[in-house]
Amino acid sequence: MKIYIAEDEPLAAAKLKFFLEKLGEGGDVSLFDNGVSLLAAIGKEKPDLLFLDIQMPGMTGMQVLERISGIQVIVSSAFDRYALESFRFQVADYLLKPYTLERLQLALGKARENIRLKQLDQQINAARLTVRVDGRTEIILQADILYLEAMKDYVRIFCLEGTRSVQRLTMETLGGIGEMLDDRYFIRVHRSYIVNLRQVTGFDSQQLELTTGTKVPVGKTYRNTIREQLKL
């Protein structure tokens, strides 16, 4: 787990890092003594967990909370008056200094559980695609999708049912659907086509062949990307 510590007191930062090592989380820890350098680092790479001091030079912890999202945060402070406002930002926990190893372990457990639940939710969403078909919401397993084709006013989603291919029509755009698909398996191969790489059995410079024998055209600008994805 990648952890950032934002703490301007060297002794407090060292104590926290020592505690984390004792709890088995000292392998990937970065220290910051102000909010400005912290935000710059987050802009390049988000941590899994941030320990955030409230009172820091240049930018307070509350100001940092206003500018970040999608990160598990444990706030630490010598004062309890910031607790209510901190939880407004849905922080995992609020540590009142000085805290014990046991209290830190409890806070760390909360953050780990939140991270686990978030990852589980992402896995569930990555396994399915929710689209509007014929005026109703339909859930399609992404693993069953062969390919998608953009038409003039709609998208055709071709799915595998047994050994045959069936299609569903949706008014959503190909680009919009593409953002919902798992990018480990789905790739744009033409301005009008997205293909499930797990269903590909053959490839040449003009087309891809799928498990059903269907042939999907390949756009010239997509050929190198396809070769990289297929490890050719």
Image (tube, grey):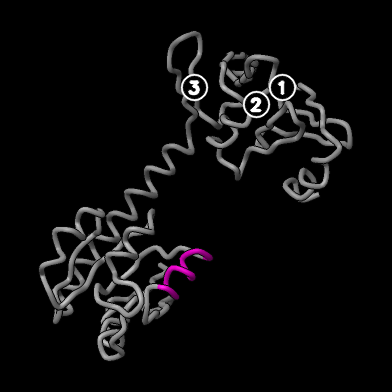
Whether residue 8 sits left or right of residue 96 in the image: it is: right
Q: Residue furthest front?
A: 58
| Secondary structure category for the residue under label 1 | loop
- Give the vertical position of 168 relative to 81 (above or below): above
- N-term-proximal mark, 2 vs 3: 3
Going by the numbered disc 3, the residue's amino acid type is: Val
Pair 1/3: label in front: 3
Q: CA distance from mark 2 to mark 3?
A: 16 Å
* Residue 44 position within the rendered picture, expressed as x and y whole percent measured from the top left: 53, 65
- Looking at the rendered structure, which numbered label has been put on residue 131? 3
Q: Secondary structure at mark 3?
A: strand
Q: CA distance from mark 1 to mark 3?
A: 23 Å
The residue at the point 63 percent across, 19 percent down is: 155
Left or right: residue 44 compared with residue 93: right
- Residue 212's label in the rendered image is 1
- For label 1, the crowd category at 10 Å Cα-Cα, with few meaning under 14, some 14 to 19 and many 20 or more, is some
Q: Residue at x 43, y 17 (%)?
A: 137
